[in-house]
Structures are given as structure tokens and as C-alpha cells.
Image (spheres, helix red, strand yellow):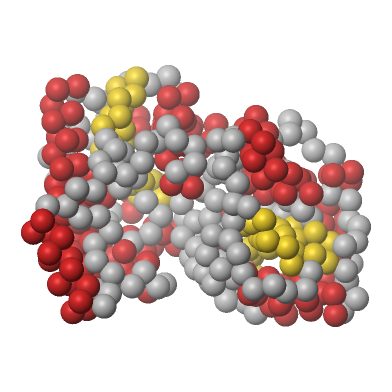
Amino acid sequence: MKVLYAALRNDPRDLDRSSSVDYGFYTAICDNGHEVHIVGPFPPRPPLAERVVKKVHDAITRKRYLKWDLASIWRASQAVNRAVATWRPDVVFSMFPATLAFYNRQAPAVFNTDLTFYSWQAHGAGFSRPALRLLHWIEGRAIRNSARVILHSQWSKQDIIARHGAPAEKLCIMPMPAAIPAHVVPETIDVQTLKRLEFPLRLLLVGKEYHRKGVDIATEAVVRLNDQGIPAELTVCATAGPAAPYVTYVGPFRKSDPAQLAQYAELYRRAHLLIHPARFEPAGIVPGEAAAFGTPTITNDAGGLGTTVRHDVSGLVLPRHSPAETYVAAITNLVNQPDCYYALCHSARKRYEAELNWRSAGQTVEAVFQEAAHL
């Protein structure tokens, strides 16, 4: 099968961009044996008129302008149309609505997304009202121009149905796979040795946004654990924050650098638990990475996390917006029941092997492509 891969800002062959999801899709499609042609990337080149419009917009609204300039949206869509006309692919794939907004549907398209712009706005995107309406329109066109849409959670599926009235049969759910290269994942894990419960308890949080990822909640939780007589330490990777007892900040690490990738993998290997108290998360990549090392995730039912983390299988999913004391209670319960903790480590790893890796995800992508190509 010939697959046209429509990029936008980044080359999908770059492991360090787009949280490695672009790279994951691209390599999975290639590994499925398809002939892949990339169109793009398209660096932003807004004309003078649009730069003036943006400047006026920013001055009046004090809000965020479009995620992509209109010139890039038109340029990307037209480049896709030309590539389809000349190369004649069986399927077009993209992660970006801008590339499909003005697509002419000469070949079936598969679109990947994890949330709508309106839901992003509800959780702090900060777009102006006119910018949000225009982005919603662009997003709707991309969905309508696609034969199938790959999503990463049940929450996202309901979000798109509610916002755009998309037919349920067009929407396919694929849990977000780990974005860590498979060669650093151990082939087998001896849970009793690697995850032996000992003190201090090692908690890990991986995330770039301090507030949205709930670093403050995790910080309060580790302090409370120590206050209650459970020695614990928290390592926060990829962001910085105020100094706090029992908290160490590290990273971020570049996955394309072997030495840095090894350091990153070691964080998951050493951790007893990945704590992910995100206030909002459309899907979440790091719980899959943790599961690869038999590290369960303790999180809450915000956004799509209830799909990425399966409760009592790859971790614990607490009620949405749970406070620090709820995390402390759940962690304390696991510490007091080592057999339950070790069973969770085993099942987390099994779920990684079954669904949270790009080999398995690639099979899902292949099924969607075959379905789209034969509509």
C-alpha cells in the first residue's frame, strides 16, 4: 500500500519532536511494509497582511491567535492535494487538521487527534473567541474530509461526537502507546527484584507543564507520605519548580541521544510508581512508558487517562481531580499490601506487551488503513 504522510511543523522521522508520537506513527506505518512518502514539513511563513492581522488581534483581544497561520493551512492542504494527484496513494495520513482542512478527498484520509479545540480551550488554551471558532471550523473540515479518525480514549471519542456530530463508526480508539524506543525496554522483568518494595519509596513524575501535570499535587503527596512515617522521594522529569523537601528535578532528556535515553529509561526502571496527578490530559504517553518497565501509574480520571491507564491493571485511576491526600491513601494501601503491588507491576507490564507499544499499535493502524482504503 502507498501511504502519503502529511507532516506540518516537524519531520516525523525526528524522535525528539511532537512527543515522539509523529515518529511512532511513521515508523509503525513503515514497519507494516508500506511505501511511505512524506509531504512537508511546512515552516510558518505568514504574509505581511496576516502578520498585521495577528498584531492587531493580539493588541485587541490579549488572547492567543490561531495555532497555525492561515497561509500555512492553505499551503499544507494544497501540497497534499498536489501530492495525491501526482503520487496516487492508497491512503493519506496526518496528525494535523491544517493539512486536511482543504483536502479534496482524492484518496481516503486517516486523521489522528486526541482532543478538540473547544476542550483544549476549556482547559487553558487561551485562544480568542474568533480564533477558537475558526480553529473549530478547520478541525471540523478535517474530520469530515477523513474516512477514519484514530483517537486515544473513550473520552476523546465522546468529545468529538458532541462537538462535531461525527458518526461513531468513523472513530477508532487506540490507547496511546509508549513513546520510548523498544530497544531500551527490557525483554523480561523480574518484578520482585526490580520493583522490590523498599524505602525510601521512589515516585516518578514526567511532564513539561508544572500546573497541568499536577507537580504541586505530587509534591504535597510526597511530603504527606514522609510526615505519616512512609519514607518517600519524588523525582520530577522534564520540568522545573520550586524547591521542596524530598523532591528532585531532572531532565528533560533527548531520546535521540543514546546516553540521555539510557538515563531516561533508568528513571522508569528505578521507580516504584509513576505518579501522574494531571489536572487535564487528553491521552498521556508516560503511563505506557512506565508500564514498559513494570511500573504502575497512579493517576486520576481526567480527560483520557481512564483509557491510557486501565484501573487495577496498569495502575490506579482515582476520581477526577483527586487531592494529594487521596493519592497518599492509595499509595499507603499499596505499600501495606505488597502482593497487590507486585501483581499490579506484573499486569502493567503485560498491558504494555499487549497494547501499549507501537508494534501492537501498528496492527491497529494497519486495520484502520485497510478499512479506509476499501470504503
Q: How many marks?
A: 0
Q: Which image quarter: residue 58? A: bottom left
Regarding residue 147, the answer to whether it shows in the image is no
State whether residue 136 is above or below residue 366: below
Q: Nearer the viewer, residue 159 or 102?
A: 102
Residue 351's spot in the image, x, y percent? 65, 44
x 19%, y 22%: residue: 87
Task: Say left or right for 350 vs 288.
Answer: right
Residue 296 found in image quarter: bottom right
Quadrant including the N terminus: top left
Quadrant of the snapshot with the C terminus:
top left
Residue 56 in view, yes or no: yes
Q: Position of residue 141 (x, y in %)?
A: 19, 53
- Residue 316 vs residue 77: left or right? right
180 or 305: nearer the viewer: 180
Q: Residue at x 15, y 72 (%)?
A: 56
Q: Position of residue 22 (x, y in %)?
A: 42, 40
Question: Which residue ends up furthest to the left in the rendered image?
Answer: 49
Residue drawn at x 52%, y 65% as measured from the top left: 209
Q: Is residue 280 left or right of residue 222?
A: left
Residue 322 on image: x %, y %: 62, 77
Residue at (73% x, 30% y) in the render: 187
